Image (spheres, rainbow, N blue to C red):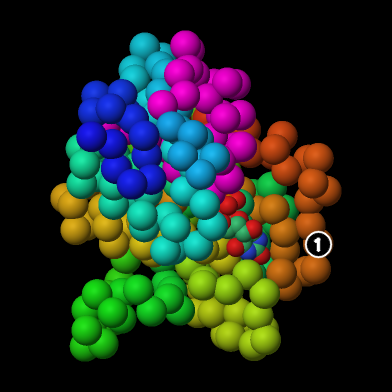
Amino acid sequence: MPTPHISAAKGEISDTVLLPGDPLRAKWIAETYLENPVCYTEVRNMFGYTGTYKGRPVSIQGTGMGQPSAAIYTHELMDYYDVRTVIRVGSAGAVHEDIELRDVVAGIGATTNSSMNRIRFQNVVDYAPVADYGLLKAADRAAAEAGIDLRVGQLYSSDTFYTDAPEIEALLSDYGILAIEMEAAAIYTLAAKFKARALAICTISDHIIKGTALPSQERQESFGDMVEIALNAAVQS
Ligand SMILES: O=P(O)(O)O[C@H]1O[C@H](CO)[C@@H](O)[C@H]1O
Ligand SMILES: O=c1cc[nH]c(=O)[nH]1
């Protein structure tokens, strides 16, 4: 029996899954980087594919935008399909002066304004969602081998894309946050719950402090470095 949101049969999804927010990015990654990709779900047009990379089975599953959506896919993958390694491959907005457009950032941790973990931990604990150290090391190694400067630091997983309080983003930058995205904190938390491994890697598509952005046609091309790091980390670790 499939899950409510994924129509694959058990065994059709690898234990190692890349998680882009955009389902069309899942399609592009599968068709560009995997050998023999097969689409295993089209429920809600949130595409998922399994193929091989360097001889190892790897799946790519879209998550949609925001922590509630990403949490549904991560939960079903880990709880029902026995997925044990996930790497988010996302876009993010830089909030730090040292980060530039097209930089690839790996989130060692994910600060968040989401209420999801407040609900989970009954408003008693401020849980600190963190990446899997082994996966992070594998990504760092894969980036070095490819000659890519992987920036490692904290992400901010926000529940809002548009904000009325830009001063919060400036404050977070002062406290070392590199970039804003919308899913990593939920994915890291669920990986901990299911004794799995998670890492979020993001390409900087816009710079919130500097007010610059990649033209839309350049976005997909700029994701190549991130995807290669993620796939090589996935198969090496
Ligand atoms: O490009 P993706 O992976 O969707 O990630 C980022 O882009 C979306 C916002 O435009 C949010 O999902 C954010 O996390
Ligand atoms: O969540 C996101 C993703 C890309 N750019 C942003 O500013 N925020």
Q: Quadrant of the C terminus?
A: top left
Q: Quadrant of the N terminus?
A: top left
Residue 27, picture quadrant = top right
Position of residue 61 relative to residue 175, above or below, is: above
| Magenta-colored span | 15-40
Position of residue 170 relative to residue 139, above or below, is: below
Q: Residue at x 33, y 47 (%)?
A: 4
Q: Is residue 53 magenta?
A: no
Residue 165 horizontal/vertical position (percent): 64, 87
Residue 166 horizontal/vertical position (percent): 67, 84
Ligand 1 lies in quarter: bottom right
Position of residue 26 relative to residue 51, above or below, is: below
Q: Is residue 34 magenta?
A: yes
Tell me: 189 left or right of 70: left
Q: Who is closer to the viewer here, 47 or 52? A: 47
Q: Residue at x 78, y 69 (%)?
A: 210
Tell me: 70 left or right of 24: left
Q: Which residue is mark 1?
A: 212
